[in-house]
Image (spheres, rainbow, N blue to C red):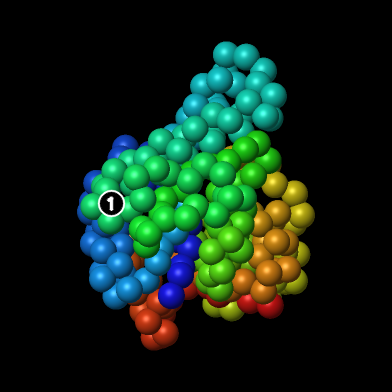
Amino acid sequence: MTYILSVGGSLIVPATGIDTTFLKAFRRFVLSRYDAGDRLVIVAGGGVTARKYVQAASAVEKVPEDDQDWLGIHATRLNAHLVRTLLRDVAHPEIITNPTKVLHSRSRVLVAGGYRPGWSTDYVAVLLAQKYKAKKVINLSNIDYVYDQDPRLNPQAKIIKEISWDNFRHLVGDEWRPGMNAPFDPIASRLAQSLHLQVAVLNGHKLANVQKFLDGKKFSGTLINN
């Protein structure tokens, strides 16, 4: 089975620095799925690294959105290179930087970063799902569920365990901006809906729970479907 794993940059490099505890656990997880015969396409996000570079540039000079995007893209590629290096015994030796081209590789583990301005790594993940004929995108972040409102602003926000693409897109809107904080980017959501993809939003710190999802067992998280 082919799965797309979109790994949030906040998991790889949170505010406290590179999270080697997560990276060790993630390597074990990937190897276990590799041994089970799966193909995994891993997309690394930029997270705090991207935001810090954009904030630093903007503190010195007014920076156009395209240049903000490029800073974020290079941050995702740095994170992707770190992940690929840690999986060098099973992963293709180069990271994917253009998701519009199919990489013909015998490796069953591929690692990708960002592509170009205006394209989030969520969008890259959906394009890779299309190219490699995957039906599921697993979006790993630091949250357990999607909520109907931002729980940091409203303690009464309600957990969403399953939601249609129409309702999810109503929730997140139709526009994407550099550094946008959404469970899954609006532009990627539109394409995912048209491709009839299933997206699972899961907590990447709970990889045993991610295993349950992949094994078809009861899990904690949010499913987005047609």
Quarter assignment of residue 5: bottom left
Q: Is residue 52 left or right of residue 191?
A: left
- The residue positioned 50% from the left and 27% from the top of the image is 53
Q: Is residue 70 left or right of residue 106?
A: right
- The residue positioned 59% from the left and 78% from the top of the image is 162
On the image, the x and y values in percent for residue 78 come to 41, 36
- The residue positioned 62% from the left and 38% from the top of the image is 116
Quadrant in which the C terminus is drawn: bottom right
Quarter assignment of residue 109: bottom left
Quadrant in which the N terminus is drawn: bottom left
What crowding class fits label 1: few (fewer than 14 Cα within 10 Å), some (14-19), or many (20 or more)?
many
On the image, the x and y values in percent for residue 90 come to 28, 56
Q: Amino acid at mark 1?
A: Leu
* Residue 35 vertical position relative to residue 110 in the rendered view, above or below: below
Q: Nearer the viewer, residue 79 or 183?
A: 79
* Residue 79 vertical position relative to residue 125 in the rendered view, above or below: above
Q: Nearer the viewer, residue 101 or 31?
A: 101
**Secondary structure under badge 1?**
loop
* Residue 106 vertical position relative to residue 162 in the rendered view, above or below: above
Q: Say which residue label 1 marks.
A: 87
On the image, the x and y values in percent for residue 186 come to 69, 56
Residue 74 visible in this rendered orientation of the protein = yes
